[in-house]
Image: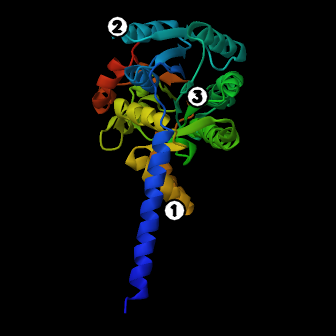
Amino acid sequence: MRKPWIFSAFLLGVGIGTRLVCKAVVKDQHRLNLHDRVVLITGGSKGLGLALARKFTDEGAKVSICARSQKPLELAREKLESSGKDVLAIACDVREPEQVRLLVEQTIAHYGRIDILVNNAGIIIVGPQETMTIDDYADTMDTMFWGTLYPTLEVLPLMREQRAGLIVNVTSIGGKVSVPHLLPYSCAKFAAVGFSEGLHTELAKEGIRVTTVVPGLMRTGSHINAFMKGKHGVEYALFGLVATLPFVSTSVASAARQIVQAARQGDTEVIITPQAQLLGRLHGLFPGFTSGLLTLVGRVLSPTSSTEKRRKTGQEVRSSAGKLLTALGEPAAHDYNQYAQQEI
């Protein structure tokens, strides 16, 4: 007589296999063809934004990039167009609603529509909590929360009219797990994650997809332009080191590939780097443990504490030792426009 458990296991296996096949078929049917799609990328002149512009145009998309500073923006446009890319570059401060409105209007006037919005603009301020001011919190929130909200609200009427569209919000693992010496950054990213996840649940019924991107550490070269507070040189060396080491960070090109792949597939969320995935899951399961672990990290960092509240960029404060510690990040800094002159 056939054992009942064998038959049950067989049926279970068939059921699971059928579900996986159906899921794959549905996912393939919803795969987005990026050829001739119009993609608007904020913070597109440097780092991850520039890498995303390259990758989207490699897929045949038409790209509009924006940034506050004109020179890095023009350099990015020249780099992309030299490879035969279709690129529009518009100066825009995403913290200003009127400038965002004009950005969207100019992109639509040039290309006729916007299919994908990538909210990527960001700012990093590194230092102990006692050095942070109200302005530090305001600047990070203005850039990474309001600077995500304003472009989203501007493109939504068009996407609703089209009954289609994709909004990609680049957040951070710092928006799921708050780490020492990045408190304003984490606050803004937590807000962005909440907005992105909630937006997904509300827009799905309208045919508009939302992808929440949660990167871990990436070699974007952004440590060059991150703002340091407290003991500036020490903060730069520590932040730059962990942001550029290959075994704890990923290349910006790899991150861009994963984000574009998630956009193509319409994924709800993509967490970039195994380290970020592990940290996010560990914190979800054992928040007390990760909090205690990060408290220890904070104590290790405490000797770097200082009451110095002035902001200085990494480029301004790095010493010879700092340059040596962050040497592995130099190729990305040069390739992705981090040394372009800033216009403050």
**Which of 97 and 5 lies nearest the eye of the viewer?**
5
Element type where label 2 sits in the image: loop
Q: Give the residue drawn at x 53%, y 62%.
A: 285
Q: Give the residue drawn at x 55%, y 38%.
A: 211
**Which label's residue is closer to the chain start, 3 or 1?**
1
Q: Is residue 19 above or below residue 44?
A: below
Q: Give the residue drawn at x 52%, y 30%.
A: 124
Residue pushed farthest front?
A: 1
**Type of the residue with mark 2:** Ser
How far across and how far down the image is residue 316, in percent? 43, 19
Q: Residues within 10 Å of mark 2 (few under 14, many from 20)?
A: few
How far across and how far down the image is residue 20, in percent? 44, 57
Q: Residues within 10 Å of mark 1 (few under 14, many from 20)?
A: few
Name the residue beneath numbered marker 3.
Answer: 309
**Which label's residue is closer to the chain start, 2 or 1?**
2
How far across and how far down the image is residue 232, in percent? 46, 29
The way the protein has been coloured in the rendering is rainbow
Name the residue beneath numbered marker 1.
Answer: 289
Name the residue beneath numbered marker 2.
Answer: 82
Are discs 3 and 2 less than 8 Å apart at CB?
A: no
**Which label's residue is closer to the chain start, 3 or 2?**
2
Q: Is residue 24 above or below residue 118?
A: below
**In the rendered view, does 341 fall on the left or right side of 330?**
right
Q: Quadrant of the N terminus?
A: bottom left
**Type of the residue with mark 1:** Phe
Cα separation between marks 3 and 1: 31 Å
How far across and how far down the image is residue 334, in percent? 33, 18
Cα separation between marks 2 and 1: 50 Å
